Image (cartoon, grey):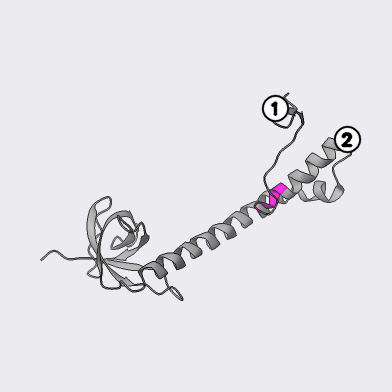
Amino acid sequence: PITTHSAVAAPYAHCTAPLRRLVDRYVSEICLAATVGEPVPEWVSAALDALPARMAEGSRRAGTVERECLDIVEAALLKDRVGEVFDGCVVEVEERRPAVGTVQLESPAIIGRIENTDGERLPLGERIRVRLTQSDPGSAKVRFEPVRSP
């Protein structure tokens, strides 16, 4: 196996920053122990069985925070544009409620919830004109409705 990094010209082990992913905290300890020829610390070994569930929970929480941050930025970007009409594409339609789904605007690059208030099915995959009906960065995501053809 390769044990030398060409740029470092020395034995080398790598894992990502422990601040980014919980699992890397444990990987770092395993690498450190292996490097000095010592056994893996007991607290690391004891945690390994539970680690996959903790990693999944951490990823779920990180994803939630990331989505909520994006929602706030999108709402702030559009806060003064409620009532404006945009071009977009219906990228998702709820199976149980086909009048509700997700629209991706062409410009600005924003994804938001869309609801056809008359109950008519949204046209999945089609380009449509949508009106921004809600954009409140402090409490809600952006919301759209289809623009009816005259």
Q: Which mark is residue 6?
A: 1
The image shows residue 147 at horizontal and vertical percentages of: 20, 65
Most common SS among magenta residues: helix
* Residue sitting nearer the eye, 94 or 43: 43
**Type of the residue with mark 2:** Gly
**Type of the residue with mark 1:** Ser
Q: Nearer the N terminus, badge 2 or badge 1?
A: 1
The image shows residue 141 at horizontal and vertical percentages of: 41, 69
Query: Callout 1: helix, strand or loop?
Result: loop
The 10 Å Cα crowd at callout 2, few under 14, some 14 to 19, many 20 or more, is: few
> Left or right: where does residue 63 sit relative to residue 105?
right
The image shows residue 119 at horizontal and vertical percentages of: 24, 67
The image shows residue 117 at horizontal and vertical percentages of: 25, 70
The 10 Å Cα crowd at callout 1, few under 14, some 14 to 19, many 20 or more, is: few
* Residue sitting nearer the eye, 139 or 17: 17
Q: Name the residue under label 2.
A: 37
- 42 lies above or below 120: above
- Magenta residues? 20-24
